[in-house]
Image (spheres, grey):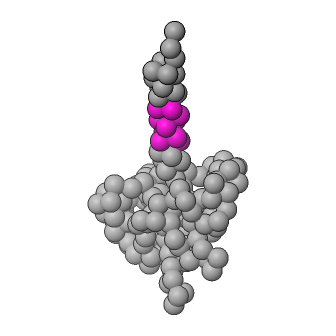
Amino acid sequence: MQIGTVSNPTVVVIGPGDSVLEAARLMREHHVGGLVVVKDDGHGKVPVGVLTDRDLVVGVLAKDVDHIKMLTVGDVVTAKPIVAQEDEDVSAVLDRMRRNVVRRVPVVDAKGHLVGIFTLDDLLGVLADDFASIGALVSRQRTYEAEKRVD
C-alpha cells in the first residue's frame, strides 16, 4: 500500500517566521498535535520542519516562558523532518518513523512539495476499517453457509 493512499491531504501548515503563539492557536483551532513548517519555493510548499505540541511544551514552556512572545516557529521547530514520498510503501515509512521515533510524517510529491501528512492515527483508522471488513466477511460467511446448508 502506498503512503499517499492513506495520508491525509489536509495539512495545517505554518511558516518558520510565525510566532509560537500563532502555532499554538492553530493547533488548538484545528485540533491537531503538530504543524508542518513550510517554505514556498514558488511552485509549492516544501516542508522544512515539523512543530509538535510537545515541542512547544518541552522546548518553550518548560524552559523560557518570559520570552515566549518573541519566539518564532523557526526558533523551536524540529528541522529537517523525516518525509515520505507519496508513492512509498507504508511499511517502509513506518520503519523509518519507528527508527526516528516520530508519530507524524509530511508526505511529498516527486518535486518535494507537500501533498499530505501521515500519522499513526491515520494508520489506526485504516487498520480498524480493514478489521471491521474482515469481521463482516466472517459473519456473512456463517450466515450464507447456514442459509445454503440443507440438512
* Horizontal and vertical percent position of residue 122: 49, 50
Count of picture labels? 0
Query: In this picture, which residue range is highlighted in magenta?
Result: 127-137
Residue 27, magenta (yes or no): no
Q: Quadrant of the N terminus?
A: bottom right
Side (left or right) of 110 relative to 66: right
Residue 132, magenta (yes or no): yes
Side (left or right) of 95 relative to 143: right
Q: Name the residue furthest front.
A: 150
Which quadrant would residue 64 be assigned to in this image?
A: bottom left
Image: 147 above or below 40: above
Q: Name the residue furthest left.
A: 29
Q: Main secondary structure of the magenta part?
A: helix
Q: Residue at (34%, 55%) from the top-left corner?
A: 31
* Horizontal and vertical percent position of residue 8: 47, 60
* Horizontal and vertical percent position of residue 143: 45, 23
Q: Nearer the viewer, residue 146 or 40?
A: 146
Q: Residue at (52%, 53%) from the top-left corner?
A: 119
Q: Nearer the viewer, residue 146 or 32?
A: 146
Image: 142 above or below 102: above
* Horizontal and vertical percent position of residue 25: 31, 63
Q: Is residue 96 visible?
A: no
Q: Is residue 2 visible?
A: yes
Q: Nearer the viewer, residue 93 or 49?
A: 93
Q: Name the residue furthest bottom.
A: 42
Q: Residue at (55%, 59%) from the top-left corner?
A: 5
Q: Residue at (42%, 72%) from the top-left corner?
A: 14
Which quadrant would residue 66 be assigned to in this image?
A: bottom left
Which quadrant would residue 111 be assigned to in this image?
A: bottom right
Side (left or right) of 129 relative to 29: right
